[in-house]
Image (tube, grey):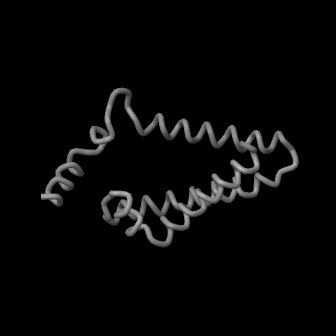
Amino acid sequence: MDTKLYLTIAGIIAILYGIGFLLIPEQLNVLLGGLSEPHVIYAQRVFAGAALAWGLILWFARDFRDWDAVRGVLIGSSKGRRTTVRATRKPGSSRMERIPPSTKALRRSRSA
């Protein structure tokens, strides 16, 4: 895949997520299977700002003429993503094991 095409696609996706979680966090949270509690909505709006900023960086990086600048953006993006993935998972655990017990109980009570 061409670098410019990758930066364009990744930038558009990040911008859409950022705008979505900024403007309609409750609806996206329900769509993605999350809880619509005030602290979750606040965290999603913080994430929205970061996603929007990252998307704009990627969008404008596609027009860089200097390969070293593009390379810096790509390395920073991949390292940040890898750190996020490693921080949110434990080896050998499933997604449901990482969810706090109180949230599991709340989901069970809502589905019953």
Residue 56 locus on image (x, y percent): 68, 59
Q: 13 or 77: which is nearer to us?
A: 13
Q: Tell me where residue 30 sits by quadrant.
A: bottom left
- The quadrant in which the N terminus is found is top right
Residue at (39, 69) in percent of width and height: 27
Locate residue 107 relative to residue 46 in the image: left or right.
left
The extreme left residue here reads 112
Residue farthest toward the top in the current orientation of the protein: 92
Q: Quadrant of the C terminus?
A: bottom left
Q: Quadrant of residue 19?
A: bottom right
Residue at x-position 17% and y-position 60%: 110
- Left or right side of 100 for 40: right
Q: Examine the rendered structure and indicate whether residue 101 appears above or below residue 23.
A: above
Q: Where is residue 102 in the image (x, y as percent from the top left)?
A: 20, 49
> Among all residues in the image, which is located at the extreme right?
65
Q: Which residue is drawn at 50% across and 67% down?
A: 20
Q: Position of residue 95 (x, y in %)?
A: 33, 40
Q: Is residue 111 left or right of residue 43?
A: left
Residue that extends furthest to the bottom in the rendered view of this protein: 23
| Position above or below: 106 against 96 | below
Report the front residue among 72 and 11: 11
Where 65 falls versus 25 (above or below)?
Answer: above
> Whole-percent x and y of residue 24?
45, 71
Tell me the quarter of the picture where residue 35 sits. Answer: bottom left
Q: In the visual, does 9 lie left or right of 98?
A: right
Tally of marks: 0
